[in-house]
Amino acid sequence: MEKIFRKSLLYRSEVEYADFCLNHVEGCSHGCKYPCYAYMMKKRCGIVKTYEDWCSPKIVSNALELLDKEIPKYKDKIKYVHLCFSTDPFMYNQPEVGGLSLKIIDRLNQNSIRCTVLTKGFYPNELANRNGQSTNNEYGITLVSLNEDFRKEFEPNSAPFKDRIKALKNLSSRGFKTWVSMEPYPTPNLIKQDLREILEAVAFVNKIIFGRLNYSVKSSEFKYTKEFYNSLAKVVIKFCKKNNIAYHIKEGTQQ
């Protein structure tokens, strides 16, 4: 995998449910076509030029060295560190990315900094064998459908949904905190599905985050977007309260 060098790694996130964040890879081979907000921003800024360039990830070669320099600087300000918002820490079929992610998580935990992690890949068994400080981490998957045809169209190179759920459930059974990001949840003109079935598939998690689909011309063609997301937000809230699951409805989802 091609490598790049950066001058900084940790930064304070502006995402409503996050604290500090890091992105130790440039690009993502999953190639999501919702479209991907991270790809759009990187292209707009001229960091990547094409979709093909984005789908050929480059690893930050000095990520661990940067962590060693920046942890003392930010440690008193950090509540937790999120991996990742503009790439995927356990990118499917990219073992070099996952290997570095494990080292980063360990380095943060060794400094008494917990992590929240989100992937469209799946978590390796090696992670489930960790204990101690790492059990304070929160491991999540993105899951907006159970339909593999939908995944192949909109998340073409990501892990199959069932594999994501299985790996997350394994972590949950080992005592790790787990969560699901149901964002961007698609409108019915993209796929007709029952949200309750998806919720039932992840009823074992500790937290669910639900959010609407943005930045899509196709979703804007659906006439009842406001009513659709308002009704689904109520379904999520009711389900979570019934099953004692924490929840967060993203800003702008309910109107």
Image (cartoon, rainbow, N blue to C red):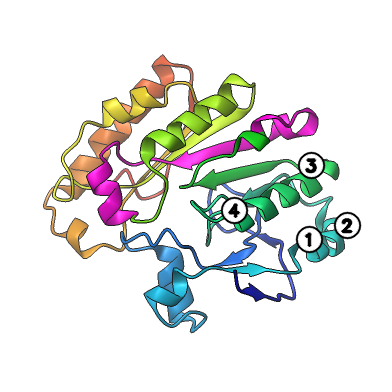
Q: Quadrant of residue 170?
A: top right
Mark 3 or 4, closer to the camera: 4
* Residue to which mark 2 is pinned: 72
Circle 1: element type: helix
Q: Is residue 106 above or below residue 215?
A: above
Residue 61 is left or right of residue 234, and the answer is right
* Residue to which mark 1 is pinned: 64
Give the crowd class for mark 3: few <14, some 14-19, many >=20 residues within 10 Å: some
Q: How many marks?
A: 4
Circle 4: element type: helix
Q: Along the polypeptide, which appears first: circle 2 or circle 4?
A: 2
Tell me where residue 175 appears, x and y as whole percent.
64, 21
Give the crowd class for mark 2: few <14, some 14-19, many >=20 residues within 10 Å: few
Mark 1 or 2, closer to the camera: 1
Between marks 2 and 4, how big is the CA–CA gap? 29 Å
Mark 2 or 4, closer to the camera: 4
Give the crowd class for mark 4: few <14, some 14-19, many >=20 residues within 10 Å: few
Q: Quadrant of residue 126?
A: top right
* Residue to which mark 3 is pinned: 109
Q: Along the polypeptide, which appears first: circle 1 or circle 2?
A: 1
Between marks 4 and 1, how big is the CA–CA gap? 17 Å
Mark 4 or 1, closer to the camera: 4
For the record, the magenta segment spans 128-155
Q: Given contact means CB atoms under 8 Å apart, are the residues at marks 1 and 2 in contact?
A: no
Give the quarter of the figure containing the N terminus: bottom right
Mark 1 or 3, closer to the camera: 1
